[in-house]
Image (cartoon, coloured by chain):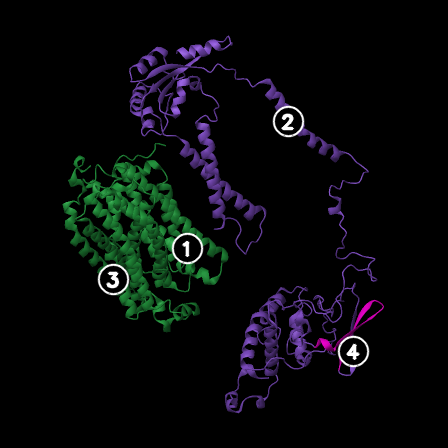
Amino acid sequence: MSSKYDLESIELPVTWKRLKPIFFAAGLILLAGGAFLSLFARGADGSTDSAFKFFMHSYLANFMFVMTIALGALFFILIQFVSRAGWSTSIRRIAELIMTTIPFLALMFIPIIAILFANYSAPYEWNVPAEVHSSVVKAKIDIGYLTKEWFSIRAVSYFVLWIAMAFYFFGHSRKQDETGDVEHSLARQKWAGPCIMIFALSVSFAAFDWVMSIDADWFSTIFGVYVFAAGMMAFFATTILISMALQNAGKLQSFVNVEHFHDMGKFMFGFIMFWSYIAFSQLLLYWYGNIPEETFWYQVRLQDGWQYLAYGLIPLHFAIPFLGTLSRHVRRHRLGLTFWAAWALAVHWLDMTFLVMPNAGAPSFMPIVGHLLGGIGMLLVFLSFFLVRASDVPLVPMKDPRLPEALTYANPLL
Amino acid sequence: MNNNEHNVKSNKEPRPPKACGWMAEFENEHDLLHAAEKVRDAGYTKTDAFTPFPVHGIDHALGIKPTILPFIVLCAGLTGLCTALLMQWWMNGVDYKYIISGKPFGITPASIPVSFELTILFSAFTSVLGMLALNGLPKFSNPVFTNAKFDRATNDRFFLYVDATDKYYNRESVKELLSSVHANSLDEVIEDSTPSELPRWILLGALLIVLAGLIPAAIVLNMRASFSDLPRWHVFFDMDFQPKKKPQQTTTIFKDGRTMRPQVPGTISRGQLDQQDPFYLGYDPLKVKTTSIDGEKQIYVSTGDSVANVSAISPAVQPPAGTPASGTPASGTPASGTPASGATPALPFLEKLPIEANEENIKLGKAKYEIYCSACHGYSGFGDGLVSKRAASLAQDTWTPPSSLHLDRIQKQPVGQIFHTISKGQGKMASYASSITPQERWSIVLYVRALQRSRNANIEDVPVDQRGSLTAPAPSQTK
């Protein structure tokens, strides 16, 4: 196999390798600049406390923005082995590299844990029980669920599980690069099923802990699925964009073709729909029940200017991209697919903002700019992590027994 | 060619067999793809390939254009969406406005699931039916079946067919083209010459079945248009006429002629033990004596030595207006409120609270009073609750204002009577027995007593150490 193909085309472009420190530094500068705008440029309406609260929410939203992408990659790898998929082999390494940024992202979660142990009530109000007025939240604190110690233990457990899964799958993939032994595929197939169960539970609980507990009065059992759906869409958008960029840099030419882009586009389209389905399911039940203890979460998101974001998500996250990616001709068109992937990534950031930020209070201009800078900074840091992973690794699993299937794969002509 | 001619000879039909096109047989899919590309490049469009398994690229090789089915399905889906939205807007917003859970009329978030489902339904039906229509299905026969070689198309041979209806079709040139590719064999497809008419006996049988199916309908129509003196048929006689008695029927078995038997005196129905306990009733049932005169039930209440006639209620007669409309308890003791005068105690009501007058019960009573009672009677018990004020402002004569709990007659009522009023209702006030437990009802009575006393208190009622706080004049407290 390897003799037939240009081995240079499966290496990261040299210029990209040089970008690692630049992206990382630029990302940190943007994060710091965003923090500065959030913390110090807040207008007359905001006290120091509320500015800090806004910044912490902003950091958490931006963290979830990239974290969900990496979790999407992990799930994508698992599902490829559960379904024994062949078509995806040539783009699977990119997903694997995104997946293996999880340990770095765990480092990005440390500030949140540190803030908890410094006894701040942002972003999690339950961290300072004296400031909690709701009896529901007090009960959750009293039974010991929402305490900083137990929260941290859970967070560490999630990361341990995800990192263990990621490195099991990545490790076998790398070993197969050398030996080509089919046993490595079989081992991953064997464990993919149980891992998906672990993944489903851990992601759901992580979503409850990290995002839903910002407003610990509120509860939604479907919340984990919502975050998962959003992350999957963002993962496919990211993978499409990275693959496109690699091809534009002259790489992967003979490995990734329009059929793979078409399939990733289908998945992205599917998860745009799935996100809408889940988001609406959650809304409909609360709208219909119309009970104050359930609807206030939406109330917070429908006032103080956040309503433009909340209502905006309906066209931006559903109607427009749904109709935009409905046609196969768009999904098979390089520029068209790139545009909609970038769109999906942008609205994913808006979605995470919608989930996290309204609890920090009314937005004002400069902190929102700070939040946007932080989002771009977080994405750059995330990309630098990806580049660190991708630097010394071939971008295609050359000895995977399913690679020929991926290379000859074609969508049926409708 | 040879076996085709053989087929033709064995047929008696005089009409000459029609040639439908050419069919080439191939050993493998590569030859087929190659041949299909040649045929496509020659400009033929009415072509088809038959293979035992899906061959990648055959659509492209045959020059098949992408189907327009997706656009048809999109249109159908949008039609379904619009149909659903229009239907719900018309039904719930215009034609039949009906309040459901206090939700607004017309299009709401609750309309989305129906819209979604109709979108899917229209799309799914259009997909299936459109696919059948565009493919010209169902098609029960095809001329290619006349060739016995074609059976191998489901097994190990690959066929390419050029139809004679193609606008560039020329018998000789197509034959020449197909001869130039690596075909195993080349045959002209001859029209299936077996008769296409249905056999006469099938038609006759179908006609008979249809006619037989009309018989029940004809009988029904006849019966609807005619009259009969005959009694109706009872197919299951013993189910229509069962040897049993139903409620409200008469019988000769018992002397009083009733099928529904009254309770034997002294028995308590299962689960109704509380009907005998003053805690649940507000009065002592053992002090209630009943007697029957001329078939009418008369209730005598013994209050100490004197015996007061409360009311005479015939089982068939409704209680007169003014008495509460609450039902008769199963114990046989009719519920009876006070007569309109309210002066004499009607039932042997408890004079003493069966619960302790402590702070916990007062708090419980206050909470429950403010939930259930204050809406009408007001937070202070003057009958000035929000509902009452609103009803008064509407000034309609249907509203009976709730009593002030500070009226002299209510102050004089024994605690058991207030409990009884909460349990059974009074006048326009409904029973709250299903919402408030007996313990809570007694707590409310306790709280009502506290409210009443608060309006008639003097300085001796205030604890000594707190009297100082009352010396300052409070305008709202002056009485």
- Circles 1 and 4: CB atoms closer than 8 Å: no
Disc 4 and disc 3 on one polypeptide chain: no
Chain A's shade in the image? green
Disc 1 and disc 3 on one polypeptide chain: yes
Segment tinted magenta in the rendering:
B284-303
CA–CA distance in space, label 4 to label 3:
86 Å
Of the two numbered discs 4 and 3 in the rendering, the one whose residue sits closer to the viewer: 4
A324 above or below A57? Answer: above
Name the amino acid type tagged 3: Ala
| Residue B253 as seen in the image, left or right of residue A393 | right
Please provide percent x and percent y for residue B196.
52, 17
CA–CA distance in space, label 1 to label 3:
32 Å
Name the amino acid type tagged 4: Ala
B362 above or below A37? Answer: below
Name the amino acid type tagged 2: Val
Please provide percent x and percent y for residue B124.
46, 37
B34 above or below A268? Answer: above
Element type at mark 4: strand
